[in-house]
Image: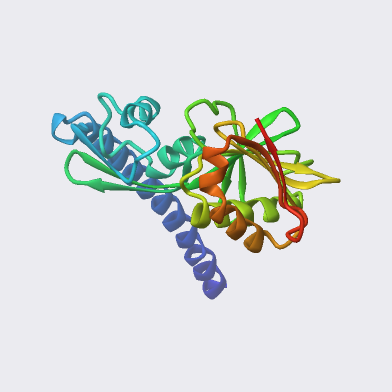
Amino acid sequence: MKRNRYRKQKNKYPFLIAILSILGLFILSFLFGMTYTSLCQLHYFKIKDIEIIGTHLISTSEILKNIKYQNKSILAISPAKIAFSLKKFPLIKDISIKRIWPNKLKIIIQERKPIALAYINQHFWLVEKNGECILIKDYLNFDLPIITGLKTEKDHYLKSALMTLSLWQKNCKYLELSEIHIDRDLGIILFTIDGNQILLGNDNFEKKLAILKKVTAKLQKERIKRLDLRDTQRIYAKLE
């Protein structure tokens, strides 16, 4: 009987230890919270400077306006939340935010490198070299060739348009390209900023743009408004 009574008394201790442990954790959490709050209120940790690296297309003022860091402690800000809020800018591809103690933030931005705009279903998209398209609202700030005639941002003609743009930049950089139009029957049609129209068709873009490079001077001198290169054996030109 004594042995059983001893066992019952002994079983009470784990319960008591659990209560004391929970109480201890509660007290530690409370003390930690009070300490953290006090530290956040110290002027020493208030953010005084933000360094922004990597911006060329986005203004620094736009980024600062979206951070809302005024009178905030470096202890209280969340780099992940700031990065998430800044990723709403379509030109930002990647972002890294670092705390520099005691009162500075460093923001490293990797911008997208658009090479064209695409007008698809009454919306404008930024187009990168790899064919990735990013929907944008404000297109007026971009001085880029426009790709038209695509049905979706995944249209297989986009690849041909980007190939043509790349070849154009190599062969005809003295002519400023305004538009690359996709025509399902005629193929690719190019428009220069001066209003010249160049029909390329659906193939042999490299050869056709090499021919165009040779006749660039004539295109400007003789005021050729329309040049049909769909058949490289029979090139047609229409004067102004």
Please tell me which residue lies in front, 8 or 52: 52
- In this rendering, does residue 51 appear at all? yes
Residue that appears at 41% across and 38% down: 82
Residue that appears at 18% across and 36% down: 45
Q: Give the vertical position of 213 relative to 62 (above or below).
A: below
Point out residue 80 in the picture as x, y percentages from the top left corner: 43, 44
Q: Give the vertical position of 11 relative to 198 (above or below).
A: below
Q: How many labels does the image show?
A: 0
Residue that appears at 40% across and 28% down: 66
- In this rendering, does residue 129 appear at all? no
Q: Residue 121 occupies which quadrant of the picture? A: top right
Please tell me which residue lies in front, 8 or 98: 98
Q: In which quarter of the image is the C terminus?
A: top right
Point out residue 60 in the picture as x, y percentages from the top left corner: 32, 32
Answer left or right for 106 relative to 26.
Answer: left
Q: Give the vertical position of 122 relative to 155 (above or below).
A: above
Residue that appears at 61% across and 50% down: 132
Please tell me which residue lies in front, 105 or 206: 206
Residue extending farthest to the front is 222
Point out residue 149 in the picture as x, y percentages from the top left corner: 75, 39
